[in-house]
């Protein structure tokens, strides 16, 4: 894998990215198809109560069917019926195969040297193919009982065909044989055939099937007792019968016992018990053609593949849920620990406090890289100049064309220096400012960010510890009005700042944001300044400092106010650059995984966290959404809704705690449920496109965010 460096002005190669998006879309569609197939097979219908649906007109059913024999042949438009001859019993079983009861029934048949006809359900055959293979090996017949035990009489034409032909495909794909007999689920005797069932029987006849009805129903599905089942099966005279029993669909212990007793009784009464085909003298099964076998095998493997996909997704969802829960526990636990540590540091003399370090009072150089920042440069510079800590401000105009430098110079502030240079990118501007810095502590701030008067002083205090090389401040959203602004506000407080507290305690801070960060000048020079290898120069720089042995910490009381994107398009561009640049930085610094000290902590803790939480989980997120839709349609929608609410509750509790830590009002949290339906999808699509772009080896150009001029110089002790 090779991630390209930024080349200014070079556009993305759309064809390669589009090709990868096509692949990703195809994968998502395939997963959707797999879920649909499994939902259809296992949840849309089911084997259970096998009673005949009540009611239904029979006005369109021919008299030849209503008063005819149980084997109905309506192929070619002519209705013919036939039944077994006298003293012949065609023994049939529905709803199997079942892993517990079918083998026992086959054992009973084998003991009595009797064959039977099994009308199998395709979804059950897929789960237990060995039982169908045994049926055929034992000399029994196999007939079609639909793919999912669907009521064909109430099903539309497309589903009737799918159910019948799908079951046939499964039988042919597993056994290499093709069935010619079909029994509609929930069917009974001839006089119970309704218009709907008759329509389904005709449709099956057009596909070459003979329909087998019943003359003696054991009603074993009701489990009325062994004696009652025997009584229901007992013929009242010598007339041939088609007997109905069940080997699947529930507890069939009574069926097994009644079958054994009934076969003994039939033999004593001189009845011949056999299959439907043998009873009426027809070939009920044939060798499937090569085309039918190939088609059936492909169908079976497709269904099995969908089953494997769903199983894998189910386990992945469990893992994702566990990881999400662990993250919630970790970030809140570490945030609480970070808060306690900050309180101890701010309260000298308390038991367990760290050694008291002198206050950092030395002056600071603040570097403001600016390219076409005319909308906010005045507010940014004025706010920094109003700091209650001595600062030197260097505004580096990176070839602006909108008069940014002129505006900064027109302020006439004594501690502000404006430097003009040709456009070379943000890293170039930062390095230019670094070369002109007069002080050993350097603060870097974006041109669309304003400080509070106490921000600089609060930010640099951790430098009293000589091990610390960089400090991240607390970035706040200034234009948080509207739902998009509220969503970003929630994300900054919860997603970014909670994570930074965790990274601080774990000593693996991966990013000091460009909006507010403080650095030791000599630390920056030791790592070669700000690199232009990636689009996330702030992340790249922070990782370089960690690998050089410096600690990077988070100072939550050093607040900076920044302007957030005000449209979905602008937000997409910003996050796309951030995510792509972060991937570049992670790849560039992958060697930290194998290092020791601060570098190893970054590699094994920080990069691992980013990989799992900010790359892999978002990549999996679309599948979660597809699975949620699957659950609402095919599973228990109440349970799915409860799981979603539980997930939302965890997020809400995390958010509420984060807002409390940052002393924010809880009002914007009402947007959290809505965030799950638009904002979250946008964020994971950003990750997906970033990964696709990186894997495609595409050069991504810098996306500059539109400025709106919403920044204002905050007064002292800003109320939020």
Image (spheres, helix red, strand yellow):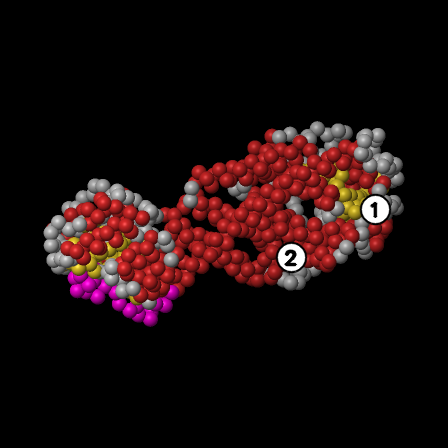
Residue occupying the point 63% across, 43% down: 327
Residue 300 in the figure: left or right of residue 443: left
Q: Taking the image as drawn, is residue 330 in sight?
A: yes
Magenta stretch, residue numbers:
276-297
Badge 1 crowding class, 10 Å Cα cut-off, few under 14, some 14 to 19, many 20 or more, is: few
What kind of element bears circle 2? loop
Residue occupying the point 37% across, 60% down: 129
The alpha-carbon separation of the residues under discs 1 and 2 comes to 36 Å
Determine whether label 1 and label 2 are within 8 Å by CB. Answer: no
Relative vertical location of residue 430 with respect to residue 407 in this rendering, above or below: below
Residue 494 in the figure: left or right of residue 390: left
Residue 190: % across, % down: 16, 50
What residue sits right under mark 2 in the picture? 700
Residue 205 in the figure: left or right of residue 565: left
Q: Quadrant of the N terminus?
A: bottom right
Q: Which mark is residue 467?
A: 1
Q: Quadrant of the C terminus?
A: top right
**Quadrant housing residue 637:** top left
Badge 2 crowding class, 10 Å Cα cut-off, few under 14, some 14 to 19, many 20 or more, is: many
Per the image, is 647 magenta?
Answer: no
Residue 413: % across, % down: 83, 38
């Amino acid at each position: 894998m090779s991630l390209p460096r930024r080349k200014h002005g070079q556009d993305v190669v759309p064809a390669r990215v589009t090709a990868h998006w096509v692949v990703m879309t195809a994968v998502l569609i395939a997963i959707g198809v797999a879920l649909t197939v499994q939902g259809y097979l296992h949840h849309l219908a089911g084997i259970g109560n096998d009673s005949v649906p009540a009611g239904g007109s029979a006005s369109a059913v021919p008299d030849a069917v209503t008063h005819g024999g149980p084997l109905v042949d309506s192929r070619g438009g002519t209705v013919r019926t036939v039944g077994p001859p006298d003293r012949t019993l065609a023994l049939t079983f529905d709803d199997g195969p079942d892993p517990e009861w079918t083998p026992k029934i086959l054992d009973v048949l084998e003991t009595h040297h009797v064959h039977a006809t099994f009308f199998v359900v395709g979804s059950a055959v897929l789960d237990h193919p060995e039982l169908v293979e045994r049926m055929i090996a034992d000399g029994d017949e196999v007939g079609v009982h639909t793919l999912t035990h669907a009521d064909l009489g109430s099903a539309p034409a497309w589903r009737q065909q799918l159910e019948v032909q799908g079951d046939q495909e499964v039988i042919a794909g597993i056994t290499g044989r093709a069935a010619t007999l079909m029994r509609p689920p929930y069917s009974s005797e001839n006089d119970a055939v309704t218009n709907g069932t008759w329509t389904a029987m005709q449709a099956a006849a057009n596909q070459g099937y003979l329909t087998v009805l019943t003359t003696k129903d054991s009603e074993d599905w009701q489990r009325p007792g062994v004696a009652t089942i025997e009584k229901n099966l007992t013929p009242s005279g010598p007339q041939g019968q088609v007997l109905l029993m069940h080997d699947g669909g529930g507890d069939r212990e009574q069926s097994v016992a009644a079958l054994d007793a009934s076969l003994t009784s039939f033999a004593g009464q001189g009845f011949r018990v056999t299959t439907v085909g043998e009873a009426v003298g027809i070939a009920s099964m044939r060798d499937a053609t090569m085309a039918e076998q190939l088609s059936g095998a492909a169908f079976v493997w497709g269904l099995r593949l969908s089953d494997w996909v769903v199983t894998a997704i189910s386990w992945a969802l469990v893992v994702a849920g566990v990881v999400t829960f662990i993250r919630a526990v970790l970030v809140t636990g570490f945030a609480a620990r970070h808060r306690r540590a900050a309180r101890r540091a701010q309260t000298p003399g308390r038991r367990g406090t760290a050694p008291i370090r002198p206050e950092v009072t030395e002056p600071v150089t603040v570097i403001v890289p600016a390219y076409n920042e005319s909308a906010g440069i005045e507010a940014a510079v004025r706010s920094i100049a109003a700091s209650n800590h001595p600062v030197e401000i260097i505004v580096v105009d990176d070839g602006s064309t909108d008069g940014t430098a002129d505006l900064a110079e027109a302020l006439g502030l004594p501690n502000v220096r404006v430097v003009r240079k040709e456009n070379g990118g943000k890293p170039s501007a930062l390095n230019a400012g670094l070369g002109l810095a007069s002080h050993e502590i350097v603060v870097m701030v974006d041109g669309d960010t304003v400080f509070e008067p106490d921000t600089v002083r609060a930010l640099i205090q951790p430098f009293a510890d000589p091990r610390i090389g960089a400090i991240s401040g607390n970035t706040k959203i200034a234009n948080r009005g509207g739902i998009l602004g509220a969503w970003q506000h929630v994300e900054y407080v919860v997603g970014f700042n909670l994570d930074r507290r965790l990274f601080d305690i774990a000593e693996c801070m991966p990013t000091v944001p460009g909006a507010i960060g403080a650095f030791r000048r000599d630390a920056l020079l030791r790592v070669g300044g700000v690199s232009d290898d990636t689009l996330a120069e702030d992340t790249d720089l922070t990782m370089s400092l960690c690998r050089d042995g410096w600690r990077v910490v988070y100072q939550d009381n050093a607040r900076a106010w920044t302007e957030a994107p005000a449209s979905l398009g602008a937000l997409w561009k910003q996050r796309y650059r951030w995510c792509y640049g972060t991937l570049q930085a992670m790849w560039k610094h992958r060697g930290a995984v194998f290092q020791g000290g601060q570098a190893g902590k970054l590699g094994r803790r920080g990069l691992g966290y980013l990989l799992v939480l900010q790359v892999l989980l978002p990549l999996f997120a679309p599948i979660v959404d597809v699975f949620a839709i699957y659950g609402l349609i095919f599973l228990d929608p109440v349970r799915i809704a409860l799981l979603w609410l539980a997930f939302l509750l965890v997020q809400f509790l995390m958010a509420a705690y984060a807002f409390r830590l940052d002393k924010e009002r809880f009002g914007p949290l009402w947007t959290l449920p809505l965030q799950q339906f638009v904002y979250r999808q946008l964020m994971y699509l950003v990750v997906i496109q970033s990964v696709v772009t990186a894997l495609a080896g595409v050069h991504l150009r810098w996306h500059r965010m539109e400025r709106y001029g919403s920044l204002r110089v905050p007064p002292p002790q800003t109320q939020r």
